[in-house]
Amino acid sequence: MISISETSTQRLRALAAATAAALLLAGCGTAEDDAPTDTDVSASPSAISLPVTPVTIELVDPGAEPRSSLTYEPAGEQSVVLTTSSTVSQQIDDQAAQDFSTPEITLPLTAQAPESDAGGEIRLRIGTPTSADQRLTEALAVAEGSEAGLTVTDTGAVTALSISPNADAEDAARAAIEQALNQAVYRSISFPSEDVGVGAVWTTEQQVVSGLTLNQTTTATLRERDGDRLTIDLRIDQTPESATLELPDDAGQLAIDTYTMSGSGTLEFDLGRSLPVSGEVTVAGEQQYSDPEGTTVLRQDISDTLRWSTP
């Protein structure tokens, strides 16, 4: 049984932060999740490559005639601004609610599309990051010039994220950048292989693993198309794969009593660009967890927003 002792409270608070990150699709994951994979030490001693779970795409409605393929062929360089914000309020039993929100951060990005022989990796260079939190802005200043990479397929599906922060970047800045880029990855759009027209609807299925395994379904609707320019409406729904959540450090389990997490938004794409041109997506929900004896209850209200804009 999980008591309401200070130790348990601290563990639950740590869990709250980790769980919130997982639900937001923005967390750094557990220590095991964060273990460097295929680390490129020649680029940076702290460079890591994080695999991204596979995406399954299914066309639901091909839309109106005329129909044609959505051929994702990014080329050249693109300047874009990524802004993310997350609000997390959590309460244990009748204690005062606590705020685990992440300050809004803005990342100016320069994306370089892959060359024909580059293995499908989009290279990202981070400009001067800023935050609504002045202390974080100061920490982020040292991260200017950090690099990242997105490995993509010809459908636009991201299969890996690599991050190479500047060696002098503080942990807070590294975590904020990783969190923002993870949000971008799991709010991205993959395109169907079939020909489609305006009104086309397709779904993508993907698991998100970061302390809690979530099954995510993204429903995309092609609202407008002007040549390579696309306006796509999104609906995102998440459900936990299991009815229980493992506490960190072998501290036991929590039952997932209730879970709602969904959202929507609109993104604009140019099939000749690496990243979305503009748009916004917000996902929000409520969760409640309890210990096996039902003596301790953890409640969370979560919302996160991602915005793309062209400078």
Image (tube, rainbow, N blue to C red):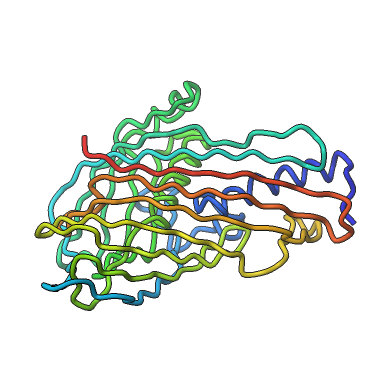
Q: Quadrant of residue 233?
A: bottom left
Q: Is residue 181 left or right of residue 93?
A: left
Which residue is depicted at the point 43% across and 41% down? 177
For the N terminus, give its image quadrant.
Answer: bottom right
Taking depth in this image into account, of 276 and 233 the one nearest to the observer is: 233
Taking depth in this image into account, of 176 and 205 the one nearest to the observer is: 205
Which residue is depicted at the point 41% across and 59% down? 235
Find residue 63 and report its horizontal and vertical position in percent.
22, 72
Above or below, 81 against 226 in this view is above
Q: Is residue 46 left or right of residue 241?
A: left
Q: Residue furthest top?
A: 134
Q: Is residue 66 left or right of residue 276?
A: left
Find residue 198 and report its horizontal and vertical position in percent.
19, 65
Which residue is depicted at the point 70% across and 67% down? 243
For the C terminus, give its image quadrant.
Answer: top left
Total labels drawn: 0
Find residue 284 and report its horizontal and vertical position in percent.
53, 48
Taking depth in this image into account, of 39 and 300 the one nearest to the observer is: 300
Which residue is depicted at the point 61% across and 65% down? 240
Find residue 75 and report its horizontal and vertical position in percent.
13, 57
Q: Quadrant of residue 223?
A: bottom left
